[in-house]
Image (cartoon, rainbow, N blue to C red):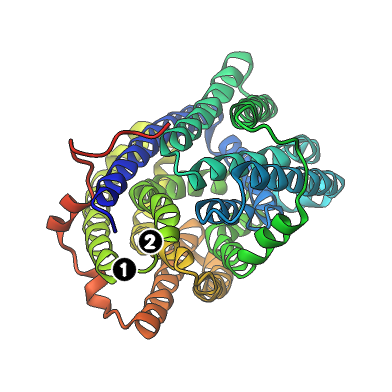
Amino acid sequence: MTSSRPAEFRRDLGVTFTGQVSAVAVTLIGSIVLARMLGPSGRGAVQVLQLLTAEVALIVSLGLPVAVTYVIARQEATAATVASTATLMSLLVGSTVAVALALAAGPLASLFLSDIEGGALLVVISSVMIPLTVLESIFLSVWRGRNKFYAFNGFKLFARCGYLGGIVGAAVLGTDVTTVVFGLIAADVVTTVVLAVALFTRFDEPLRIDRVVARRLLHFNVAGHGGTLLQEVSYRLDMFIVAGLLGSRAVGLYAIAVSTSRLLWYIPESLGSVLLSRSARTGYRRERWERIGQGVTSILLFQAIGAAALAPVAIPLVFGVAFKGSVWPFILLLPGAVALGLWKVFINETTAAGHPRLKLRSGGVGSAATVILDVMLIPQWGVEGAAVASSVAYCLTLGVLLLQLRTIYGIPLHALLMPKVTVLRTLLPTRRSAPADG
């Protein structure tokens, strides 16, 4: 590693973290506006629609965003060819699946939105967001693969501001779920167009699918995408079960608990985003893994303890008294949030090191635990049962990954998990960091 690379790493981490903090602030404002405008039931309905389209979009993305970043970072093809190929593939598949989702709107609405009037129509309208969501992730992954973290984080923040703008626009025009959905769609359209123009005006090549590049993109992350899908089962299955069994109001309460607990993930996600691009070029380095693991463990534990102490006052104060029922689910989710925050960092390192199947294995165990525990606990304990199930499943997911790392690399668990705040200084940006890239 050249002497400039640590400085570049700290600079990129600092830029990414700043972008993530800004994005979470904007997202949190949007969540607060939605909660106070719609109440638990309306907030729950919007959550179900967002989850439904987001999960379908993730499935049809075929793992392309991660593959795009990897292939561009490894310089296996030009960024223009990769971007063009991935964009057309995503547009074709995403649009086809959006039509299929719209055709299935009736059964889906009766299953997850039975207590919301016009649920089927809302599903049809929301299906438009599927190809838009996939395209946004592709465009952002190109910037990340090119190591342009200022652009990557700037456009990511722009997308979050668009989300907030859609919500605020809906609040001005009306206070019903349908108006909010139209506002979010408008925001997605604007964001996708801006990202597309900003990216493709830099390339001279025409839009086309390169068959060699397409095969490489699909082949790279097949196993890793399977792990992503399984992990999403751990993330989202509980929400759908809550919707089916307990209704939109319970989803609204649980959604606030989940989204608030995931505030802990912004530092790990910032770090993981940088590591995926950097480590694809530098390869496995045990000392780096240990230093990062110890630092992130310290941060997550500190955040979780503070959040648990503040939650009983902060959640009703910020989101409204109607969301007081979100406090206990939030506290019960915190151990799992710490565990999965660490998993997010390590899984990017293992993917970059050429082991995407580790994501499939650890995600598979976590998903199986989620299904079993959700079925057992949600009917008896409601949203608190969903929180316990998710927290246990997240801890199992991390545990399986750590055992695999010990087997492959011989890293003892305490070397990765022992809190050590002093190592954070090696991760933070310094005044001597290299100049920013564009």
Disc count in the image?
2
Say if mark 1 contacts mark 2, CB within 8 Å.
Answer: yes
Mark 1 crowd level (few <14, some 14–19, many ≥20, 10 Å Cα): few
- Residue occupying image coordinates x 35% and y 37%: 21
- Residue occupying image coordinates x 23% and y 52%: 3
Q: Nearer the viewer, residue 401 or 250?
A: 401
Looking at the rendered image, the quarter that the C terminus falls into is top left
Query: Where's residue 204, x and y in %?
Result: 67, 32
Query: Where's residue 145, x and y in %?
Result: 51, 47
| Residue highlighted by disc 1 | 285
Helix, strand or loop status at disc 1: loop
- Residue occupying image coordinates x 55% and y 68%: 374
Cα distance, mark 1 to mark 2? 8 Å
Query: Where's residue 123, x and y in %?
Result: 76, 41
Residue 305, quarter of picture: bottom left
Q: Amino acid at mark 1?
A: Arg
| Residue highlighted by disc 2 | 282
Q: Is residue 197 left or right of residue 360?
A: right
Looking at the rendered image, the quarter that the N terminus falls into is bottom left
Q: Is residue 114 visible?
A: no
Query: Where's residue 6, x and y in %?
Result: 26, 51
User: From what the image shows, is residue 239 above or below residue 385?
Assistant: above
Q: Amino acid at mark 2?
A: Thr
